[in-house]
Image: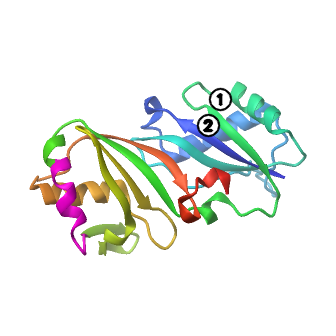
Amino acid sequence: MKMYVVFEKKPRLRHIGHLDLMRAMQRALRRSGLPVCFSKGFNPHLLLSFAAPLSVGMAGLREVMEVPLSSPVSEAEFLQKINRALPPELPCIGVRAVDDQHAAPMALLQAATFEIVFEEQAAPMLAAVPSLLQKQEIICIRKTKSGEKPCNIRPMIYNLVVADEKTLRCTLALCESATCKPDLLLEALAREAGLESKPRVMMTRTQLLGDAFAPLESL
């Protein structure tokens, strides 16, 4: 069996990178005493996988990882033991036992929702939202391993709304075939607003989504 684990990366830990986060989870699972699975070979390591890495500087409300187990454990026991080993800023908030043949979270991931709170220049950025959404194409420069390439992010913006005088909420594509990072959206919005650069913000990934925009943890 394996566990789908839902955890929160609180704002205080937003500058922790993905590798450090992964090491923290591995150490917590080791300390927990849970029957986790290890790889084979001379240097066995704990097997776990994340649905999608969180960018440095971003908090996450309902992040998802998968933990294979070598023997059955109840959901309640897993939740209790992992939380005893985790710091308060990185709590596990839910688990779901699934069969070994169940698809990995990464394979089911299609999109994510974000909350973006502006620390400056909120008014012009929010005012530019309607005109940005009217465009048929929004060309941004995406950095890839082979260099910088232009990309039309408009089809990857599924939803973009002004929540209040400082806050944007959006749903963006996040899968192997198409990904729109919030930074690209902010760059395009700053351009539309006539700003020289995107302003400082506080970003939180609020939910990971699968097919039909269902919460990933429920699939």
- Where residue 85 sits, quadrant-wise, is top right
Q: Amino acid at mark 2?
A: Ala
Q: Residue at x 56, y 41 (%)?
A: 21
Q: Residue at x 63, y 42 (%)?
A: 6
Mark 2 touching mark 1, by CB under 8 A? yes
Q: Secondary structure at mark 2?
A: helix
Label 2 crowding class (10 Å Cα cut-off): few <14, some 14-19, many 20+?
A: some
- The quarter in which the C terminus is drawn is bottom right
**Horizontally, is 212 left or right of 80 in the view?**
left
Q: Earlier in the sequence, mark 2 or mark 1?
A: 2
Please state the horizontal and vertical placement of residue 209, each as a whole percent of the image.
Answer: 54, 56
Give the vertical position of 193 relative to 31 (above or below). below
Does the magenta segment cover residue 149? no
Does the magenta segment cover residue 129? yes
Q: Secondary structure at mark 1?
A: loop
Count of numbered circles in the view: 2
**Horizontally, is 102 left or right of 124 in the view?**
right
Residue 28 seen in the figure: yes
Distance CA(mark 2)–CA(mark 1): 8 Å
Q: Which residue is mark 1?
A: 86
Per the rendered image, the range of residues in magenta is 125-138
Which disc, if any, is residue 24?
2
Please state the horizontal and vertical placement of residue 18, each as a whole percent of the image.
Answer: 52, 47
Q: Amino acid at mark 1?
A: Leu
**Horizontally, is 39 left or right of 152 in the view?**
right
Residue 50 seen in the figure: no
Give the vertical position of 182 relative to 201 (above or below). below
